[in-house]
Amino acid sequence: RKITVECPATVANLVCGFDILGMALKDPQDLIEMSVSDQPGIRISHADGYDLPTDPAQNVAGAALLDLMQGVEESVGFDLTITKLIKPGSGLGSSAASSAGAVVAANQLLGNRFSQKDLVRFAMAGEKVASGVKHADNIAPCIMGGITLIRSIFPLDIIQLSAPPMYVTVVHPQIEVRTSDARQILRKEVLLKDAIRQWGNIAGLVAGFLQKDYDLIGRSLEDVIIEPVRSILIPGFDEVKKASREAGALGGGISGSGPSIFMLSREAATAQNISVIMKDVYDSLGIDSKIYVTTLN
Ligand code: HSE
């Protein structure tokens, strides 16, 4: 039996919620085609142009499956073909899409024996291969959909948040920012006054989602800790942010560890206008860019 799963792109952090908030997008999505057999082992092939490792221990989907297989008593093996439409290193949860998609597909083939929480735990083994640390802010929304809050990863405590309808505009400038580098440059200590401002924003953002209060969402999309450091790696960041707000975006910022930038809007027309603004900024900088106008998944 062969199945195909769609693995959505995700925006981690949602500006102020570093490592604890994330949301799934309708577009772009990877595809994973998988079959199970009694021939042990994991065999990975890629149906895309990316030069990604196929050795299971080095591959994010493979590492996640190896973790899952520790919980499987019978002798099984998986054959999978990954078609990546989410570019690695884009800040759109490309590695999470592969690791989450792989364990979701495997679980279906094994008769849905694992919970979503188990799947998040397995998939985090893939994130560890990708960025050196386990974090679930791409994995959890990729598996559960919508917007998720990861209150804790040890032990795993994930809360799904409802939110009002929103449009998402994403620009992926074609430069590479490695998650591991973007984590390394962060300061290890924060000032109490910054921490207070940040947790005010996170609480405001969560309340804004739950109360469907667009103004509160907009006011809370501010990051005084991570963005000032990371935005230096992204040419055009300040311009995109300023022009998008002027065009009516609720707000936005770096998607995950970058270099993609996302903006949330209340209206489809605003999201479209912002896509033009983003394109213009990167055209004028002479940097190729890819744009998505989409919604939450
Ligand atoms: N929360 C992680 C980070 C997401 O910002 O480093 C990386 O995709």
Image: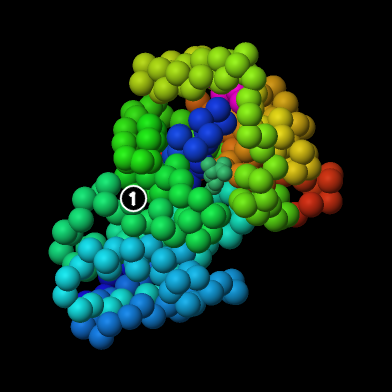
In the rendered structure, the answer to whether residue 261 lies left or right of residue 220 reads right
Circle 1 crowding by C-alpha within 10 Å: few under 14, some 14–19, many from 20: many
For the C terminus, the image quarter is top left
Q: Nearer the viewer, residue 94 or 192?
A: 192
Using the image, determine if residue 43 lies above or below residue 231.
Answer: below
Q: Is residue 291 visible?
A: no
Residue on which the image places disc 1: 120
Residue under the image location 39 percent in, 80 percent down: 43
Toward the bottom, the furthest residue is: 39
Residue 229, by quadrant, is top right
Q: Which amino acid does the dot numbered 1 rest on? A: Val
From the top left corner, tell me how far across and down residue 143 is, in percent. Answer: 34, 49
The residues colored magenta run 219-223
In the rendered structure, the answer to whether residue 120 lies left or right of residue 213 reads left
In the rendered structure, the answer to whether residue 206 lies left or right of residue 69 reads right
Using the image, determine if residue 196 lies above or below residue 144.
Answer: above
For the N terminus, the image quarter is bottom left
Verify whether residue 254 appears in magenta: no
Using the image, determine if residue 190 lies above or below residue 184.
Answer: above
Residue under the image location 38 percent in, 63 percent down: 64
From the top left corner, tell me how far across and down residue 209 is, in percent. Answer: 41, 23
Residue under the image location 49 percent in, 77 percent down: 54
Residue under the image location 58 percent in, 60 percent down: 88
